Image: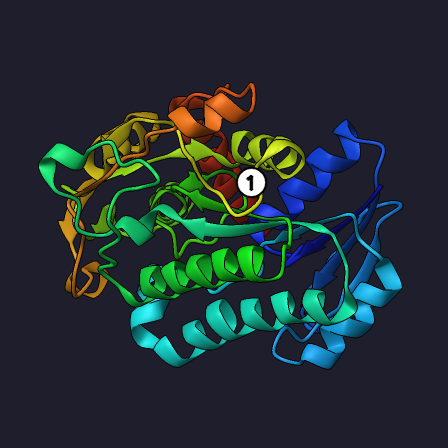
Amino acid sequence: MNALIIGGAGFVGKYLIKHLSETYSWHLSATKLPGEQLSFPGIDVYDLNLLDKSDIIMLLKKTQPDYIFHLAAQSSVALSWARPDLTVDINIKGSLYLLDALRECHLSSRVLMIGSGEEYGYIEPDETPVNESTLLRPGNIYAATKACQNMISGIYAKAYNLPIIMVRAFNHIGPEQSPTFVVSDFCKQVAEIELTKKPPVLQVGNLSAKRDFSDVRDVVRAYGMLIQKGSAGETYNVGSGHAIAIEELLNFILKMSKIKIEVQVSKQKLRPVDIPIIEADVTKLQGCISWQPRITIQQTISETLDYWRSYYKKEGM
């Protein structure tokens, strides 16, 4: 079996490559942007411009994938407010070019299209936890582009009989995640305060929002199983099934800190619109694959904090 990971140099991509290489006897290929670094033993790596369909077609013909994991995305909600044009280009146009390239190449590759729990947006109290049939009410630019990606994928699956499986992945975290995401941001700030003479003040945004967090290693396990067993044209939530307030995560991190730290709300970290709660109903997923989260949120936070401590020590700070 040949598997292709599009967006392999990203946070999730690297974990997915590691998981697939350790779990399955597949030949793996992965794509990256020209300026990115990606090196795994035995993995073929290609530069790919997702906004050039001819580039995608050449890659598909060369790799002949049985499985395609489409991870490439502009995945930051905060950045989507600042760069809606970039978010639309990558998340909608890039996904469309991939699907159309598959159609033109007459490939029957099973494709996992990665969306987001943010697509659900404004959830009514009686809709929590949200299942896959819940009405989508996207509340930010990123969520709107992912909802569009999901709809286009469903159309291509039905119109062209393509084995496309859609995922709505809820918040996933872990070591090496970009500090544009909340848990990594908090851990980075704490490590920086511990190892420098920076004032012991942690800058935060909205702490009352509740999100469904999973360890990235649990998430990629689900992806590996779902691409094999998921039903074409169907959407599956991937999450822990439990929402937790950002403030509670912050308290875990502060308890792990080696010094006392003050918390300060920063206007720069507040979003124009923030959804109060997003929590996954994973009944459909667990009816399809035998999967449960294995890694606790406390373990993930501890390892993420240790990652940033090691990072700053290496930097000589």
Above or below: residue 209 compared with residue 281: below
Between 193 and 265, the residue placed more toward the observer is: 265
**Residue 313: percent from the left, percent from the top?**
55, 44
| Quadrant housing the N terminus | top right
Name the residue located 64 percent from the left edge and 71 percent from the top edge: 100
Above or below: residue 294 compared with residue 67: above
Residue under circle 1? 310
Above or below: residue 182 compared with residue 151: above
As drawn, is 143 to the left or to the right of 14?
left
**Residue 260: percent from the left, percent from the top?**
23, 33
Between 92 and 11, the residue placed more toward the observer is: 92
Q: Given the image, on which type of amino acid does mark 1 rest?
A: Ser
Seen as rendered, the residue at the extreme left is 125
**Residue 112: percent from the left, percent from the top?**
59, 48
The quarter holding residue 150 reads: bottom left
The quarter holding residue 76 reads: bottom left
Whether residue 316 can be seen here: no
Name the residue located 16 percent from the left edge and 61 percent from the top edge: 273
As drawn, is 179 to the left or to the right of 216?
left
Q: Badge 1: how crowded within 10 Å, few (<14), some, or many (20+)?
A: few
Query: Could you tell me which secondary element the residue under label 1 belongs to?
Result: helix
Whether residue 286 can be seen here: yes
Between 88 and 183, the residue placed more toward the observer is: 88
Above or below: residue 213 compared with residue 2: above
Name the residue located 22 percent from the left edge and 60 percent from the top edge: 139
